[in-house]
Amino acid sequence: MIYTCPMHPEIEQDKFGDCPKCGMHLEPKAAFAGEEDNKEARILSRKFWIGLMLALPVFLLAFGEMIPVINLKAIVPYGLSRWLQFIFATPVVLWAGNIFFVKAWKSVLNKSLNMFTLIAMGVGAAYGFSTIAIIFPNIFPESLKQHGKIGLYFEAAAVITVLVLMGQLLEARARNRTGQAIKALLGLAAKAAHRIRKGKEEDVAIDQIQKGDLLRVRPGEKIPLDGIITEGKSTIDESMISGEPVPVAKIEGDRVIGATVNQTGAFVMRTEKIGHETLLSQIVKMVADAQHSRAPIQKLADQVSGYFVPAVLGCAVVAFIVWSIFGPPPALAYALVSAISVLIIACPCALGLATPMSIMVGVGKGAQSGILIKNAEAIEKAEKVTHILTDKTGTLTAGRPQVTAIIAAKDWNEQALLSIAASIEQSSEHPLARSVVDYAKEKNYELASVDGFQSVTGGGIKGKVNGKAVLLGKQKFIEDNGISLPEELKKKSGELQDNAETVIWMAVDGQTAGILGISDPIKKTTPDAIRVLHKMGLKVVMLTGDNEKTAKAIAKELSIADVYAGLEPKDKQEIVKRLRSEGAKVMMAGDGINDAPALAEAEVGVAMGTGTDVAIESAGITLVKGDLNGIVKALRLSRGVMRNIRQNLFFAFIYNAIGVPIAAGILYPFWGLLLSPMIAGAAMSFSSVSVIGNSLRLRNIKL
């Protein structure tokens, strides 16, 4: 197994670890379909919860000291409180937070300063300064003391450590979940097959099948591997590949695909592809490659850290030198306090809250609105989307065939026509028969028994209902039985076909009774959602495995200009790749297994909550109701969250920008002012309060 960094793909090694450049965890380079190694997540979880329990009393003790109305001294004496803070904070920083110091040291060795460098500096300075202050209090000048004591920063060191641990834990769990899409895909494959050898049938495991082996597939079973039918016929549910709900009729010589589901008939197939050659294995590889190729979120804080870290270090060094030369006696003590104060005030407490707080509130708001967001990356990238690529079936449409038109001939009414049609369809194995029967039952129409039922392959069905001879099927089937069709109904049939509806003709006792139109209807909410997306300046593109005529009819009704029809999973993924290479920021919406590679390839994948588990696992956003309006809400939410994050980062950095020069002593020559520990603590707390308060405003955002 080769591991690489998602942010720096040139980094490769043969064991799990951290990237020497950015400190991120390395990920497997190849598709990994086994059990994920949860060791790292378990370690982080243990560190986080133990660290949280130990940091809480440190925070309460320090908080009580800063608020005069709380008489903490009556409960815990001042001196004991300081030592308790030291005792509780030490394991938090040195045990729970040791991983950050390791990452920071690596960043220094590799000359690639990052957020972990800043965290280690701030936490180390806060803890180190406070430890020296409590063990060697006499080395500090009296002018720097409050009530004869130096201010402590144990609570800052402990709280920052726990906050960053929480972020690392969430990241580790999210990374483990990325393998669920691959596991779900592999779960689709058949585990065994009925192999025929020398006229005898035997059950064998899939990995024992060789090319050329003959396999028997019975009704309701998954097709084991890719191959060709050599004997028999059936209808097969290939929605896994095409996304279309109507099963496909197969006869001798037709290709069948592994993991699709056999419906009605039994057949014998010859195996053509095994192992990694199968279409299912190719889909697994496409999903894995696409997930790996997407770079994780590049937070503004990380980008700024490359400049901020050396600037803070430089300021601390300059402050130390200047105070050593020009400071009042004891100059060295003033120099040390000033340099450490710079590092403490630069400690990224608010910076650590800036992004997680906005994400947490934003994700909660999204969940209330039926938008489930997998990670912060999806929120950030959704803001920049320029193209919305959407599947047709199950996304724009309802996802299952329904009776959408009933046109009765002269002397017939809708109820009589549908009752007879549903009665004879009860005995049919045709994929569309169920939609006619279901529609009649919804209307509570009575169904009669059928005598002399016959199915004519490629034509239709015939039989007797209540003593009347009934023919049901294609137009040619009715005409071949010597029945003339009214021109008016022929015209209506043409109009229905132009609207991508399948037309079924019915004749009773030698006379035309009417026609039924069956289609996958557009969801009621889809047209309004498409109009809003256009108003937002987004380009909407339809990708579908359905035929071109049907796709264009749906697209015309929804005012979608760009349509790609007859696509396989790889084709959809290639279109996403091409658009991204041209500079487009792509959001892909779909609900099927065939959409999974494209969902993983896009900047943001949006899965319908009514769709498959594979699609949901491959996507960054899931819409609970499977409603396209959810995309509009998700885009508005992402824009609001990212705007909020930028405001938070401003609050976090502005306090540092003002506080660092003051901590360095820039005001001392003019007014004799040095940053006192109480003011530093208040400034750090106020920056965090500002960030939290601003983040909570997202609860009121209108979607």
Image: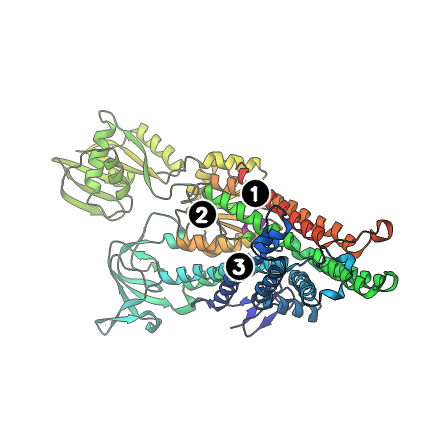
Can you say whether 414 is above or below 623 in the image? above
Q: Is residue 284 visible?
A: yes
Label 3: which residue? 52
Q: Nearer the viewer, residue 118 or 31?
A: 118
Which of the two discs, 1 and 2, labels the residue nearer the N terminus? 2
Distance, label 3 to label 1, CA atoms, is 22 Å
Residue range (magenta): 378-383
Report the amino acid beneath label 3: Leu
Report the amino acid beneath label 2: Thr
Left or right: where does residue 209 sit relative to residue 3? left
Point out the frontmost of discs 3 and 1: 3
Can you say whether 67 is above or below 515 in the image? below
- For the residue labelled by badge 3, is the local secondary structure a helix, a strand or a loop? helix
Q: Residues within 10 Å of mark 2 (few under 14, many from 20)?
A: many
Residue lying furthest top: 411
Q: Nearer the viewer, residue 205 or 330?
A: 330
Residue 143's quadrant in the figure?
A: bottom right
Report the amino acid beneath label 1: Leu
For the stretch drawn in magenta, the main secondary structure is helix
Label 1: which residue? 696
Q: Residue at x 76, y 57 (%)?
A: 144
Q: Is residue 367 magenta?
A: no
Q: In the rendering, at what x and y percent does residue 148 appear?
A: 72, 58
Query: Are dots 1 and 2 in contact, CB under 8 Å?
Result: no
Distance, label 1 to label 2, CA atoms, is 41 Å
Q: In the rendering, at what x and y percent does residue 162 appear?
A: 56, 59
Q: Nearer the viewer, residue 469 or 420?
A: 420
Label 2: which residue? 544
